[in-house]
């Protein structure tokens, strides 16, 4: 097999690319900044794109699909006849005459009213999170203590019945008539003479920092960094969090024996049998924390500290005494007919012979250039190992060779396709490696990919800044 980079560019521009127009899902629940323009439009910078609310109340959402350089906007600046958006990425964008123009990086600067405004005394809040001017009023959100108004030379609490869900305030804006609040997890809130109104954009997931994706009983499950599970069923989003599952930081998911198993970042594993969740189902394991899950359909494999255990639905078999694996974290498992491949953090890849129980370690001595293995997959007869900082490696004979033309040293996920191709997710892009070695980048807009899942409707790609669906 020879490695050939045959296509780089947008989806549909190169051989092997998925046909159809990609769909990007982001969450705008995390507001970073907001401001009113002279025409009465409210502009909102969020972690999932830019929102514009026209004076007539209609909403427009902008992401990288609409030409922005990033989904993570940080600050809104109202200019004379345009609106500038500052991004955490090294770029900015200006909205003028109905279109975006991408510009160079602009430093984020905190713009606060010029009046001195220390935190009010004798209140629970520790510091001012954000402030705004509304007409002649100056309003401040204090961390942990709600809203205050500065008037007649002193601060006073605003008794406006602030909803409990709106208390994690990250942004404020006012046009003198209405007060708008942006929050950390619960979108936007507006206060007027009639009270509070909640605004969340339609057809959005609760969060979009995707760690793993699994298909289960017709639905797609997405684990997030710290916001629980989000689920896509029949074209609609739902959200699961504590206490339904053990924690709001789920990581890996595998299906076994008709149930979905979810590994949490604290090492607990929850099980969904289709209707009911059971928490911490592997709490009786000899070594409590679970670091990796895998299944071959006949057994579920559970990586622990210094080894692994197998469960066939009735009986556990423990493999925790191999000297080669002691004192290390198991990071990935690939069970095959005669061999179990065990990825580790710091010792490379373990090749376990099922019949004799012997272990052979693969590391830099036979070409595996990084001893921290993130993921393992076999595609088209070739075994691949994705590493933390060394890139992607393919097994050739008894050794390993580095796969070139894969941008980004950290390989975050590998998925084999029925065609024999391999999908590769990295922090920089997503690639397909064909059986003949041809390498294709799927879409230049997809960056910081972290999870892959192929379904009938297309390929789901989970990234740090959004969930992409690449239709077939």
Image (cartoon, rainbow, N blue to C red):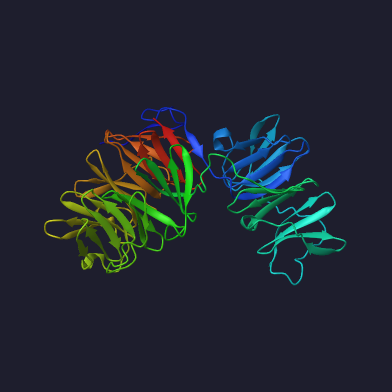
Image coords of residue 158 (percent x, y): 76, 59
Report whether 249 appears left or right of 49.
Answer: left
Along the line of sight, which residue is nearer the eye, 122 or 394?
122
Residue 263, percent from left and from top: 37, 57
Closer to the camera, 127 or 202? 202
Q: Residue furthest right?
A: 152
Quadrant of res 317: bottom left
Task: Work out whether residue 354 or residue 286 is closer to the camera in this orientation and state it.
Answer: 286
In this picture, is 26 found above or below 346? above
Quarter of the picture holding the C terminus? top left
Residue 105 sits above or below residue 272 on the image: above
- Left or right of 423, for residue 165: right
Compared to residue 86, the image places residue 434 above or below, namely above
x then y, percent, for residue 176: 81, 47
Question: Which residue is painted at 32% across and 50% down in the image?
Answer: 254
Q: Residue at x 34, y 47 (%)?
A: 392
Q: Residue furthest bottom?
A: 122
Q: Residue at x 22, y 56 (%)?
A: 313
Q: Is residue 447 left or right of residue 403?
A: right
For the residue pair 456 and 270, the one nearer the viewer reads as 270
Q: Position of residue 93 (x, y in %)?
A: 65, 39
Q: Is residue 374 visible?
A: yes
Residue drawn at x 60%, y 37% is: 62
Q: Is residue 332 visible?
A: no
**Left or right of 424: which side holds 203?**
right
Q: Quadrant of residue 326?
A: bottom left
Q: Quadrant location of the N terminus?
A: top left
Q: Looking at the image, how many numbered discs can be counted on the residues? A: 0
């Amino acid at each position: 097999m020879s490695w050939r980079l045959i296509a780089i560019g947008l989806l549909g521009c190169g051989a092997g690319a998925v046909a159809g127009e990609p769909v990007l899902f982001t969450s705008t629940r995390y507001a970073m900044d907001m401001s009113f323009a002279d025409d009465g439009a409210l502009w909102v910078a969020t972690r999932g794109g830019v929102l514009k609310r026209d004076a007539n109340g209609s909403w427009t959402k902008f992401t990288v699909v609409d030409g922005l350089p990033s989904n993570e906007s940080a600050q809104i600046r109202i200019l004379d006849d345009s609106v500038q958006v500052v991004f955490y990425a090294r770029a900015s964008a200006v909205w003028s005459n109905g279109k975006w123009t991408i510009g160079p990086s602009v430093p984020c600067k905190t713009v606060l009213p010029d009046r001195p405004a220390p935190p009010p005394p004798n209140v629970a809040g520790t510091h001012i999170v954000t402030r705004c001017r509304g007409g002649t009023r100056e309003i401040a959100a204090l961390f942990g203590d709600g809203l205050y108004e500065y008037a007649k030379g002193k601060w006073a609490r605003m008794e406006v019945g602030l909803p409990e869900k709106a208390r994690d305030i990250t942004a404020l804006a006012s046009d003198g008539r209405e007060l708008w609040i942006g929050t950390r997890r619960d979108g936007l809130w507006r206060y007027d003479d009639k009270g509070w109104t909640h605004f969340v954009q339609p057809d959005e997931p609760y969060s979009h920092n995707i760690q793993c994706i699994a298909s289960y009983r017709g639905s797609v499950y997405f684990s997030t960094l710290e916001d629980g599970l989000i689920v896509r069923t029949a074209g609609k989003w739902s959200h699961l969090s504590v206490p339904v599952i053990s924690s709001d930081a789920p990581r890996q998911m595998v299906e076994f024996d008709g149930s979905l198993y979810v590994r949490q970042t604290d090492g607990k594993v929850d099980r969904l049998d289709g209707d009911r969740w059971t928490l911490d189902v592997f709490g009786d394991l000899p070594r409590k924390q679970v670091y990796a899950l895998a299944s071959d359909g006949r057994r579920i494999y559970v990586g622990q500290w210094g080894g692994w255990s197998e469960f066939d639905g009735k009986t556990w078999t423990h493999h925790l005494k191999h000297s080669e694996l002691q004192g290390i974290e198991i990071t990935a498992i690939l069970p095959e007919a005669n061999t179990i491949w065990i990825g580790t953090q710091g010792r490379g890849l373990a090749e376990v012979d099922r019949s004799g129980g012997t272990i052979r370690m693969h590391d830099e001595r036979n070409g595996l250039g990084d001893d921290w293995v993130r993921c393992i997959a076999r595609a088209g007869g070739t075994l691949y190992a994705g590493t933390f900082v060394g890139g992607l490696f393919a097994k050739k004979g008894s050794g390993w060779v580095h796969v070139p033309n894969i941008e980004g040293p950290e390989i975050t996920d590998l998925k084999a396709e029925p065609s024999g191709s391999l999908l590769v997710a990295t922090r920089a892009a997503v690639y397909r490696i064909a059986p003949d070695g041809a390498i294709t980048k799927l879409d230049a807009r997809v960056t910081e990919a972290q999870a892959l899942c192929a379904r009938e409707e297309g390929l789901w790609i989970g990234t740090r800044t959004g969930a992409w669906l690449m239709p077939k």
